[in-house]
Amino acid sequence: MGGRRKEEEKFKAEVKKIKNIWKSLTEGWFGYIFYAILGIVLALILNQTLAFALSTDLPIVAVVTSSMQHDDQNIIEINHYKWLEEKFGYNRSYIDSWPFSNGFSIGDLPIVQGSDEYEVGDIIVYSIPQQSVPIIHRIVRKNPDGSFMTKGDRNPDMLSFEYSVKKEQIHGKVIFIIPKLGYFRVAISRIFGV
């Protein structure tokens, strides 16, 4: 019985030692640095895990512009519904059947999944050579050569680079949106211009 008691005491001493080490790491100014580094490491691990699971190099993005925002119905009526009807003959019920038909807002955090196929109405994340920040816009048409036309729902017209987005430029399509969790990224973008 004495051997068991010694083992318990030894175990308690080890636990106490670990608690003391943890306490020394997490208190005071060193604790702030420790938690910041721990947070960054955990974020990187989560990002890499999601990248692998979702088959994309960019599984999480933050919305930093209002190009997909549906906050002003008059603007959406003209720049989205009317524009799509005039350019491509799409009716309102077809447009409303698209994924995330109500768009999303600055600060939202879309989750992106890589895909072999993209359809009209999908919201995709893609990169262009002239810009360091990826673009999040909706596919509005498939081109005969296999490329895609895209447009921000709120934008009055397509931008020059949106007429031919190639599959190689696409990181994936939006499959889920976490509201407002991307405000930290928005703040960084506004402060540093990235």
Image: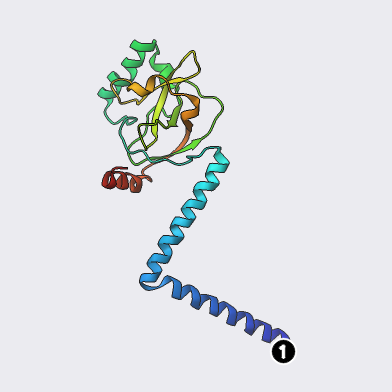
Residue 13 vs residue 28, the one in the foreground? 28
Residue 109 lies in what quarter of the image?
A: top left
Residue 22 point in image, percent of width and height: 49, 73
Residue 92 point in image, percent of width and height: 38, 16
Q: What quarter of the picture does the N terminus occupy?
A: bottom right
Q: How many marks?
A: 1
Amino acid marked by disc 1: Gly
Q: What quarter of the picture does the C terminus occupy?
A: top left
Direction from residue 72 to residue 46 in the image, left or right: right
Position of residue 15 relative to residue 133, above or below, is: below
* Residue drawn at x 52%, y 47% as measured from the top left: 48
Query: Seen from this angle, which residue lies furthest front?
Result: 129
Direction from residue 163 to residue 4 in the image, left or right: right
Residue 65 vs residue 16, the one in the foreground? 65
Residue 176 point in image, percent of width and height: 47, 37
Residue 161 vs residue 18, the one in the foreground? 161
Position of residue 129 relative to residue 14, above or below, is: above
Rendered image coloring scheme: rainbow
Direction from residue 30 to residue 168 in the image, left or right: right
- Using a 10 Å C-alpha cutoff, classify the residue at mark 1 as few (fewer than 14 neighbours), some (14 to 19) or many (20 or more): few
Residue 9 lies in what quarter of the image?
A: bottom right
The residue where tag 1 is placed is 2
Residue 18 point in image, percent of width and height: 54, 75
* Residue drawn at x 46%, y 15% as measured from the top left: 143
Q: Which element type, helix, strand or loop, lies under badge 1?
A: helix
* Residue drawn at x 37%, y 30% as measured from the top left: 103
Query: Seen from this angle, which residue lies furthest bottom?
Result: 2
